[in-house]
């Protein structure tokens, strides 16, 4: 049970990091819209995956 909780937290943290990453990179590097969309899309996907796993573990 603890291992699943830890995995969910890692998924949630990495999803949040990927959501913020394009904003941080924009100040230092040139990031295209396609790259930004790809990174944000992966971040949202990881967060949804973590939320679904948290819901499933509560049932």
Image: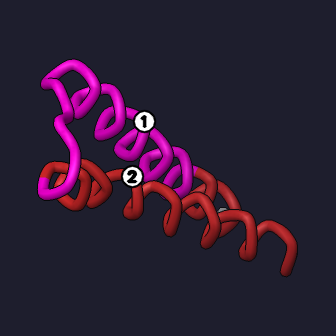
Residue displayed at 39% across by 52% down: 18
Mark 1 neighbour density, 10 Å: few (under 14) some (14–19) many (20 or more): some
Residue 42 badge? 1
Residues at marks 2 and 1 touching, judged by CB atoms closer than 8 Å: yes
Looking at the image, what colour scheme do you see?
secondary structure
Q: Is residue 5 above or below residue 50?
A: below
Q: Is residue 38 above or below residue 51?
A: above
- Give the main secondary structure, helix, strand or loop, of the magenta stretch: helix
Residue 50 is drawn in which quadrant? bottom right
Picture coordinates of residue 43, whole percent (x, y): 40, 45
Q: Quadrant of the N terminus?
A: bottom right
Q: Quadrant of the C terminus?
A: bottom right
Which residues are drawn in magenta? 27-52
Residue 49 appears left or right of 2? left
Q: Is residue 41 above or below residue 53?
A: above
Picture coordinates of residue 4, whole percent (x, y): 79, 67
Whether residue 39 is in magenta: the answer is yes
Q: CA distance from mark 2 to mark 1?
A: 7 Å
Residue displayed at 33% across by 33% down: 41
Frontmost residue, 30 versus 24: 30
Residue displayed at 59% across by 58% down: 11
Q: Which residue is mark 2?
A: 18
- Identify the mark nearer the N-term, 2 or 1: 2
Picture coordinates of residue 24, whole percent (x, y): 23, 61
Frontmost residue, 10 versus 23: 23
Residue 56 appears left or right of 52? right
Q: Is residue 5 above or below residue 18?
A: below
Residue displayed at 17% across by 25% down: 32
Q: Mark 2 falls on what kind of element?
A: helix
């Amino acid at each position: 049970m603890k291992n699943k909780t830890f995995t969910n937290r890692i998924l949630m943290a990495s999803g949040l990091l990927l959501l913020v990453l394009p904003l941080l990179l924009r100040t230092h590097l040139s990031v295209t819209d396609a790259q930004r969309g790809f990174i944000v899309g992966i971040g949202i996907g990881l967060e949804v995956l973590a939320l679904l796993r948290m819901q499933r573990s509560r049932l």
